[in-house]
Amino acid sequence: MAQKLPSVDVVLVGFGWTGAIMGHELTEAGLEVLAIERGSLRETSTDFAPTFIQDELRYRYRGHLFELTAQETLTFRNTSDQRALPMRRLGSFLPGTGVGGSILHWNGQAWRFLPYDFEIRSQTIARFGEGMVPQDMTLQGRHL
């Protein structure tokens, strides 16, 4: 059964780069804004951990950040008199999905390392001892 929500002044469909800017400006002007996003919220710790950032299979080949053409049919035409045909392969046109949209792919954001990220090895040794870090592990850290 549908649930009736309280009224708002503006509903934004999509909360990527443009939606976020519009939402900010509209709320600064005193309007009540609701943003609707079909994708999920992305969290730094689970979606953009340093070990995932270099995951070429996940991002390049499986398109983790992009719309899936098997689920959403995008159509394209060069001029208004052409027939719009479905795009089955996105090529260089890569619309993002989820909160943040394409800005996540096109690097409109920048995840920054925390000081701890540069001290993991030394902090692990200090807390648990030298035996917790295998010799062949590439973990870096400042020297104690």
Image (tube, helix red, strand yellow):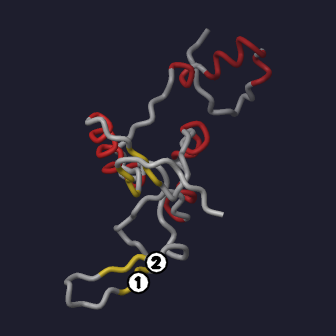
Q: Is residue 110 above or below residue 102?
A: above
Residue that carries the numbered disc 1 in the rendered image: 86
**Residue at 29% across / 41% down in the picture?**
26
User: Residue 6's spot in the image, x, y percent?
Assistant: 49, 47
Residue 76: image quadrant is bottom left
Q: Amino acid at mark 1?
A: Pro
Marks 1 and 2, the one that precedes in the sequence: 2
Mark-to-mark CA distance, 1 and 2: 6 Å
User: Can you give x and y, in whole percent of width and height, for residue 50 in the image?
Assistant: 55, 38
Image-quadrant location for residue 130: top right
Give neighbour class at mark 2: few <14, some 14-19, many 20+ (Cα, 10 Å).
few
Q: Which residue is the site of mark 2? A: 73
Residue closer to the observer: 26 or 2: 2
In the rendered view, tell whether residue 21 sits above or below residue 85. above
**Is 118 positioned to the left or the right of 135 in the image?**
left
Residue drawn where x is 49% and y is 61% of the image: 60
Task: Tell me the number on the disc at residue 107.
Answer: none
In-image side of 84 versus 137 (left or right): left
Q: Are marks 1 and 2 in contact (CB under 8 Å)?
A: yes
Residue positioned 58% across, 19% down in the render:
119
Image spot of residue 40 (x, y percent): 55, 52
Residue shown at the point (55%, 25%) measured from the top left:
117
